[in-house]
Each structure stands twice: as C-alpha cells, then as structure tokens.
Amino acid sequence: MKKDLPENNVKDIAIAVALESESVESKVWYVYLINLKNEPIENVLITSKGYGEKDGEQVKTSTLRHMIPVVDSKAYKLIEPIDEQTFGLNNEYWLSYYIGKDIFDKKFIFLPESIVEMNFIKIPVLNKPGVMIK
C-alpha cells in the first residue's frame, strides 16, 4: 500500500532555466538539473512538457524524456534548450533519481510568465542568471 512506502523527500535538488547568451536578435535559454547535495544522484530520469493557454486556445508541447546516468555532488547537467515562446505556458519537469537503493521523485513547474528578468537570480553552481525552483 502507498502508506507503507517510505516518504523520500527531494531536498537540495533544483531545476533552473538559465540565460545562456543573448544578442540583438535573440536570447538562448537552457534548462539545467542542479545537484546541491553532498552526494551524487544516479539513474536520473526527467520528462518535460509544456501546457496551458495561448491566444485563447489550449496548447500542449511534445513530452520529452531525458536520462542522465550520474550527476555528481555540487554539479549540474544540461537537460534541454528551451524556446522563449513556451514561457507563457506551464513548463513541467518531472524528475526521478536514485541515491543507493532509494528512489526519489518530484515535479517542478515553471508557471506562465515566471521566467522573467524580475525573477532572475545568480544560479548556484551554474553561476548564470536565470530562474530556479528548488
């Protein structure tokens, strides 16, 4: 039963949308997984999708799946590039990973219009400007 499963809370793990570079014509954005733990995480699976309303119509992006064998302690890994046109949607990243034999999972959702300069921080470990959910 579900009540018999251990409650494995995700701590010290973040998903960040970072501004990689910008020019007069465009900005380049990437999504990163950041491990702030003092131990590596393994067998990392991430699904990403966007959904919401745009111009009065319901919109859904494709669901993408990513696998990362190991993310070392105090390290980051690139998940995917992200298009600015999706910033008006909910951008969801569902993360699962192992530490030893224990599995952890958490859903991170960047709400519409949350990826704006007003919300920027200097993202730890990555040292780039962007928005982070921990």
Image (tube, rainbow, N blue to C red):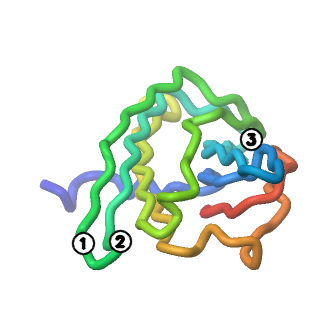
Q: Which residue is mark 3?
A: 38
Image quadrant in which you'd find residue 34: top right
Picture quarter containing residue 17? bottom right
Q: Amino acid at mark 1?
A: Glu
The numbered mark, 1 or 3, whose residue comes first in the sequence reads 3
Residue highlighted by disc 1: 57
Element carrying mark 2: strand
Whole-angstrom CA distance, mark 2 to mark 3, is: 41 Å
**Image label count:** 3
Question: Which kind of residue does numbered mark 3 sit on?
Answer: Asn
Q: Outermost residue toward the left?
A: 1
Question: Can you say which quadrant of the picture contains the N terminus?
Answer: bottom left
Measuring 81% from the left and 58% from the top, which residue is drawn there? 129
**In this view, the mark in front (1 or 3):** 1
60, 78: nearer the viewer: 60
Q: Residue furthest front?
A: 25
Crowdedness of circle 2 by 10 Å Cα count: few (<14), some, many (20+)? few
Q: Nearer the viewer, mark 2 or mark 3?
A: 2
Q: Which residue is mark 2?
A: 54
Residue appearing at x 45%, y 26% in the figure: 67
Task: Tell me where residue 109 appears, x and y as whole percent.
Answer: 46, 64
Between the residue at mark 1 and the residue at mark 3, the CA separation in whole angstroms equals 44 Å
Residue closer to the observer: 102 or 33: 33
Please report contact status of discs 2 and 3: CB closer than 8 Å, yes or no. no
Q: Secondary structure at mark 3?
A: loop
